[in-house]
Amino acid sequence: MCFLVVVPLASSSREVLSSKECENLGFSGLALCSDCNTLAEYVKDQELVSDCLKCCTEDSDDSMSKITYSGAILEVCMRKLVFYPEVVGFIEEEKDKFPSVKVQYLFNSPPKLIMLDDDGQHKETIRIDNWKREHILQFLREKVKPASSAI
């Protein structure tokens, strides 16, 4: 017997997981659905591809570049900072350029940016373990609205 399983990789009415569920699965929510389609070409684990599709953002007219946030929390474990010199460099030398970005030390937390909406509510979590300082700077310049008190 031979069975053919067809999995649609793009669908307008797809199941979507919460940002916390996606983070627990290892997906930050920043992946575009086209990235999941590429993943499917190389990985034969349909459950993994399915999880990716539940956590991805639709590719449409450069949609990610239009999303901005009112602020962010850079969360990291103080004891683990020694393993993340790029994050330390950002905190010590660049963080003051972003008044709406706060640093929060939480035991055992990997470095992550928690993006906040206008009401200060958590909208998205992005792991930054392997980011270079310039990537953190570029991301925050593009995604965090300038503080209204800035001159």
Image: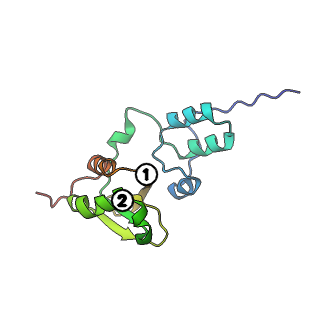
Closer to the camera in the image, 132 or 113: 132
Residue at the outermost left position:
151
Write the residue at 51% across / 43% down. Answer: 56
Q: Which quadrant of the figure contains the N terminus?
A: top right
Write the residue at 61% across / 46% down. Answer: 51
Write the residue at 39% across / 50% down. Answer: 131
Structure colour scheme:
rainbow
- Provide the residue designation for mark 2: 85
- Where 70 falls versus 31 (above or below)? below
Res 130 label: 1
- Disc nearer the start of the sequence (2/1): 2
Q: Amino acid at mark 2?
A: Pro
Q: Residue 23: percent from the left, percent from the top? A: 53, 55
Q: Residue 20: percent from the left, percent from the top? A: 52, 58
Res 55 label: none
Quadrant in the rendering for residue 5: top right
